[in-house]
Image (cartoon, coloured by chain):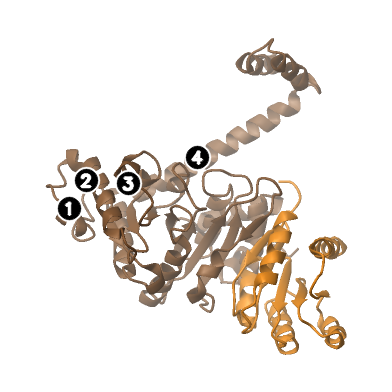
Amino acid sequence: MSEKKIRVLIAKPGLDGHDRGAKVIARALRDDGMEVIYTGLRQTPQMIAEAALQEDVDVVGLSILSGAHNALVPYVLEKLKENGQDNVFVFLGGIIPESDIPGLLAKGVTKVYGPGTDTRVVCQDIRAALADRA
Amino acid sequence: MTEFSVDAIRKGDKLALSRVLSRVEADDESGRAALDALFAYTGKAHKIGVTGPPGSGKSSLVNALAHHLRCAHPDSRVAIIAVDPTSPFTGGAILGDRVRMPDLQNDPGVFIRSMATRGALGGLADATLALSQVFDAAGYDYVLIETVGAGQAEVDIVTLAHTTIVVDMPGMGDDIQAIKAGILEIADILVVNKAELPGADQTYRNLVLMIEMGYRGTGRINGGHHRLTIATEARSIEPEGWLPPVLKTTALTSQGIVELEQAIHQHRAYLQASGAWHAKENSAIRQTIDKLILKELSENWKKTLPAGLYETVMQSVSQRKLSPRAAAHALLAYNSE
C-alpha cells in the first residue's frame, strides 16, 4: 500500500433538496484522489454520524442551503463526539451568513465555504488539515 | 491510533470494528495482526454476494434484502460491504451505494461499509475477503457483498461468497447473451429485478431457458419451466446438485424479497447438507494462502537480486534480444546460483 487514502463523507443534513453543490464537491474530491462516500438527501445528524462511524472517515463535509446550519451542525459535531470520533474534521459548505461563521468555527467546524469557492482550495484545505493532525 | 482489541470487536464496539476494517483494508502491520487474531472466530457468517450490471438495482436489492432479514430474524445482524470502482486516473472514488440503502440507516443491527476497488479488476477489492472475515469474527450473521457493476467476466465474488446472487434486469440483452459464459454461470440464484418494467417476462424466460439447457442433461428437469418456477420449493436438498432458481423482484417496493430470502436459506441448507459450505470456504482459504506465499516468495526473491540486474534484463527484452519468458528464466537462474 502507498499512502493512506483520505476518506470523506459528503452529507446533506436536513430538508433542503439542493444537492448540486454536494455533488460538485464529491466529484472534485474524487478527482483529487480521495474516496468519497455520498449518502444522499435528507439525512438526520444521527444518520450522518453513524455513517461516518461505519465508514471510518477522516472528514465529514456538510452541505446546507436551508438556513438551518446553526441547529444542524452542532448536533452533528455532538453526535460524532458521542461516537468517539472527535478527531474527524468537519467542513461546511452552502449558504452560510458571514455573521454565523465565527460561532460555527468556535464549535469545531474546520472551514466554511460559500458559493463560488474554488474546489481546489477545498482539496488543499483537507490535505493541510490532515497533514497537521499526523 | 487506538490499540486493537479482539474483545471490543466481539462485544460490538462499532468504532473499534470500523477502525480495524480500515487497518485491514490498508493491509498494514496492525491490520495483518488483527486479521490473524480474529481468524479463530470466523467461519460462522453466511456470505452472500450480489452482482450484476451497473444500474440493475444491486444496492436497492441489498437494501430490501437486509431490511427483510432484520425484520424476519431480529436477532441476527447484517453487515454490508459495498464495492464501487476506483478511478484508474486519479485513484479517487465515489462510493454511492449508501444512497440506495435508506431503510438501513437507522438500524443498529446493520453495518454498511463502502469500499473502493483500489485497482483490483475482478469486481471486488483485494481486501474484500479480509473485511468479510472481520465482520464474520465480529459476530455478524450475514455478510452481504455487493460487487461493482459487473460486465461479463467480473466473477471473483464466486470464490468468496457462499451464495452468489446475479441481478439482471429487462432490456439487457437477448437469449444469446443469456447463454454466454461468465457472470450468469456463477449464479446460485438469478434475479430479474425491475420486474415491473416491460420485457421482464422475456428476460425471465431467457434465463430460465439458459438454466434448463445447462441442467437438462442431469435429468433433474423434466421439460417445461413450470418445475423451474417452483425451484425454490422442495428442490433445496438434492444431493447431486443445486438448481439455480430464477426469481422476479422489484427491489424498490420489496416485491419478491420474501421469495429471495427463502431461496437464500434453501441454498444454505443445500450447501450444508452437501458439504459444499466447507468446500467453498476451504477453497477460498487455499487461494488466500497461495496468494500470500506467491507474494512473499516474489518479494523475498526480488530482495536478493543485485541492483540494476532487473533493469538490464528488461532492456534486452525491450530491444527484442530476449523474450519475456527467457528473461524470467535468466533472472530466476541467477538467484539459484
Q: Which residue position is annotated with label 2?
A: B212
Query: Which of the image's four quarters has the C terminus of chain A?
Result: bottom right
Which mark is first along the chain, 4 or 3? 3
Contact, CB < 8 Å: mark 1 with mark 3?
Answer: no
Specify whether B160 is left or right of A52. left
Is circle 3 on the same chain as circle 4? yes
Contact, CB < 8 Å: mark 2 with mark 1?
Answer: yes
Q: Secondary structure at mark 1?
A: loop
- Nearest to viewer (mark 2 / mark 3): 3
The image quadrant that residue A25 belongs to is bottom right
Is circle 4 on the same chain as circle 1? yes
Which mark is first along the chain, 1 or 4? 1
Is circle 1 on the same chain as circle 3? yes
Q: Which kind of residue does numbered mark 3 sit on?
A: Asp
Is circle 2 on the same chain as circle 4? yes
Q: Nearest the camera: B328 or B205? A: B205
Q: Which residue position is annotated with label 1?
A: B225
Q: Nearest the camera: B223 or B74? A: B223
